[in-house]
Image (spheres, rainbow, N blue to C red):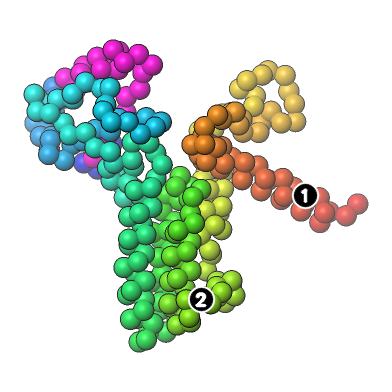
Amino acid sequence: MFADDTNILFSNHCLHQLNSTIADTNCSLVNWLNKNKLLLNKDKTVYIDFHLTQKVSSVIDDIRIENVPIQQERATKFLGVWIDDTLQWDIHKDKLLGKMKSLCYAFSILSKISDIETLKCALVHSIITYFIPFWGFSHKNVFIMQKRIIKTMKQVPLSSTTKHLFKELSIMPVPCIYIHETVCFIQENLHIFTKNRDFHYHSTRHSNDIFIADQRLHKGHSSVRQRGVLLYKKLLKMSGLARKDSNPK
């Protein structure tokens, strides 16, 4: 729950039990709403059938609340993030690129009447950073648009290189933002990750390390739990080597 938004997540290996749980929960939801004299906006209520691959129809029974059918959607906006039914994040990135293109046009006008510091304050860093640990593993097009905005700010040809511009403006490129935000997310949420000690009882020097499960699917390899943890462990290793080198014996 968040403010007036309520989301319910169902999962089950048995399709029959899944449909039964959904129906029972919907009944409980309606009873709770009635007891608390609350109304559910059914026009704004949707459901998503999450799955690994594209498919034509849903295997879930029609979902109804008080006999009103709930619309199935391939994607929906959740707290500012577009989530699709295969968790590929393509729709979210397309929406983000649309915002950046509009801002790029605005910067092309503002750059003629505003100084560079003012433009930097209005930069699109906040919308790029938002939720990037989850969708940022595939950031090529977003990075291209970020470079285009930087060139627009500096009023240089689009064919120009941007490496020195990022340094001059002290702006982090999208790949660096992804790494930074992902590592920070891991650090701030260490409690949700499984440790090696949870799988064996004998003490080793890696007992407190985050456990990385084998992944068969590309989606698993690109997830925060896989790629994010690898980035985090690599940073710890690099920082450990740095401390070792800076501590002469």
Q: Residue furthest front?
A: 56
Above/below status of 29 relative to 117? above
Quick check: marks 1 and 2 in contact, CB under 8 Å? no
Confirm whether residue 29 shows in the render: no
Q: Start and end of the magenta stretch?
A: 5-29
Q: Residue at x 16, y 19 (%)?
A: 27
Q: Indicate yes or no whether the magenta region holds residue 14.
A: yes
Q: Residue furthest right?
A: 249
Q: Indicate yes or no whether the magenta region holds residue 237.
A: no
Tell me the kind of residue under disc 2. Ser
Above/below status of 20 relative to 129? above
Number of labels in the image equals 2
Report the side of 66 relative to 114 (left or right): left
Q: Quadrant of residue 74?
A: top left
Q: What residue is shown with label 1?
A: 241
Task: Describe the element under mark 2 as helix, strand or loop.
Answer: loop
Q: Looking at this view, is 152 or 212 the one in front?
A: 152
For residue 159, the mark is 2
- Mark positioned earlier in the residue sequence (1 or 2): 2
Q: Looking at this view, is 174 or 66 the one in front?
A: 174
Category of crowding for the residue at label 2, using alpha-carbon neighbours closer than 10 angstroms: few (below 14), some (14–19), many (at least 20) = few
